[in-house]
């Protein structure tokens, strides 16, 4: 099996013809463009498929008249109201437009919330393993990381263990639900227990829920901000469009603050960071189209991903030395490679050199201390790309 540049009209939104390596090598510098031709990248957690047609049409229309004015730092009121509507209707978060802060991507959203709530000498609880952005934001403000372990075999965390880590210096609890890189969707009882603990100790929560629409039934995502709890709590919910609608390059994130006052304080924080001024009118037009008209596309995307997830897990578990649990959400896998005798970095280097497949190493730098012994790969691409990658990995692993 070989990868070829495909130019025929696609038969469906997510068939093999929709993934164009020839185009992606120019358009995707974090994934296809980061490696020489011939290497299959399963690295950056971005889809290889074009996003919804309605989004493309809206962006084209927004530039067609030739006017390019400044955009308001707060963003379009219509867009903020639509984000609030989606949060209420799909996730039970009771918020209005005054609680919504638009950001240039969810990574900026994480940084902004941490800058608002934390400073030098504070402690911030984060999961281990978890995406590197949390730790980077905590380090940037001079706070100290306090890791709460997540069981890599089950993907679950112990709320009592998390509670035991809270001290008078704890300024923030950082959650990632659904979880990157494990793909866990935390059950309601866990989310509720953490919310109760945070409220009792008056510690705010940063809940990264950018994957909240990539959840496979029967699993259900529960947003912490939707829960009624005994103790009042401050939850900053981070979400965006990059995973749901394959729009990472649009740089459109969102923070739903606990109230309008906190949203205003966060807006001022972003202005000091110079972040909100990068929200272009064209990105906002595309975001509005996605939130209003992109849901049928997302439903088809989720169906494709669910089948692809099952196929990839089966392929990985058939390779001696690899073991992969089936995640309930996201489109990344985190197989255990410890049985091979190689550490995560060495395995990543081996697969690149011997198989021509690029993956992300489960190292402290990427995901925290507990990530060692695993690698991460993204499967939001075509079956043909994935099968060639797994064929190559099987051959290389047989020589290990």
Image: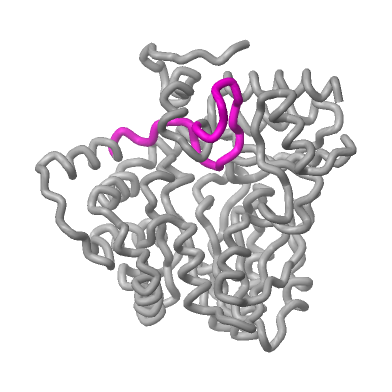
Magenta stretch holds residue 45: yes
- The answer to whether residue 230 shows anywhere in this view is no
Q: Is residue 298 left or right of residue 201?
A: left
* Percent coordinates x, y for residue 133 in the rendering: 58, 59
Q: Nearer the viewer, residue 349 or 160?
A: 349
Residue 145 picture quarter: bottom right
* Percent coordinates x, y for residue 242 in the rendering: 44, 46
Residue 370 picture quarter: bottom right
Q: Please give the name of the residue rendered at 66% of the width and 49% of the height, measured from the top-left corner.
A: 181
- In this rendering, the answer to whether 348 lies above or below 23 is below
From which residue to which does the magenta span run? Answer: 33-54
Q: Is residue 329 left or right of residue 302?
A: right
- The answer to whether residue 73 shows anywhere in this view is yes
Q: Please give the name of the residue rendered at 56% of the width and 78% of the height, measured from the top-left corner.
A: 204
Q: Nearer the viewer, residue 41 or 220?
A: 41
Q: Nearer the viewer, residue 204 or 71?
A: 71
């Amino acid at each position: 099996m070989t990868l070829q540049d495909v130019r025929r009209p696609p038969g469906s939104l997510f068939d093999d013809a929709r993934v164009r390596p020839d185009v992606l090598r120019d358009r995707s510098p974090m994934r296809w463009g980061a490696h020489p031709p011939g290497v299959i990248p399963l690295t950056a957690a971005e889809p290889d498929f074009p996003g919804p047609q309605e989004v493309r049409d809206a962006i084209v229309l927004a530039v067609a008249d030739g006017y390019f004015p400044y955009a308001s730092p707060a963003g379009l009121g219509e867009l903020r109201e639509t984000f609030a509507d989606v949060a209420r209707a799909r996730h039970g978060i009771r918020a209005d437009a005054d609680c919504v802060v638009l950001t240039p991507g969810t990574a900026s959203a994480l940084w902004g919330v941490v800058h608002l709530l934390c400073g030098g000498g504070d402690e911030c609880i984060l999961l281990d393993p978890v995406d590197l952005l949390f730790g980077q934001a905590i380090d940037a403000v001079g706070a100290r990381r306090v890791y709460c372990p997540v069981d890599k075999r089950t993907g679950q965390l112990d709320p009592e263990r998390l509670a035991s880590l809270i001290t008078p210096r704890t300024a923030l609890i950082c959650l990632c639900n659904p979880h990157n890189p494990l793909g866990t969707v935390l059950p309601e009882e866990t989310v509720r227990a953490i919310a109760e603990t945070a409220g009792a100790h008056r510690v705010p929560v940063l809940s990264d829920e950018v994957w909240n629409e990539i959840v496979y039934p029967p699993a259900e995502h529960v947003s912490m901000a939707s829960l009624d709890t005994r103790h009042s709590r401050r939850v900053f919910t981070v979400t965006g469009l990059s995973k749901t609608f394959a729009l990472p390059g649009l740089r459109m994130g969102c923070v739903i603050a606990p109230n309008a006052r906190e949203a205003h304080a966060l807006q001022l924080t972003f202005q000091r960071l110079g972040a909100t001024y990068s929200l272009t009118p064209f990105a906002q037009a595309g975001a509005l189209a996605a939130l209003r008209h992109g849901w049928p596309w997302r439903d088809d995307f989720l169906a494709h991903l669910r089948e692809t997830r099952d196929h990839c897990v089966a392929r990985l578990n058939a390779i001696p030395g690899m073991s992969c649990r089936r995640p309930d959400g996201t489109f990344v896998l985190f197989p255990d490679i410890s049985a091979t005798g190689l550490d995560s970095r060495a395995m990543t280097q081996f697969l690149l050199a011997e198989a021509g497949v690029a993956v992300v190493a489960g190292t402290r730098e990427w995901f925290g201390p507990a990530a060692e012994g695993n690698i991460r790969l993204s499967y939001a691409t075509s079956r043909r790309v994935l099968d060639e990658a797994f064929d190559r990995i099987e051959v290389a692993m047989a020589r290990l």
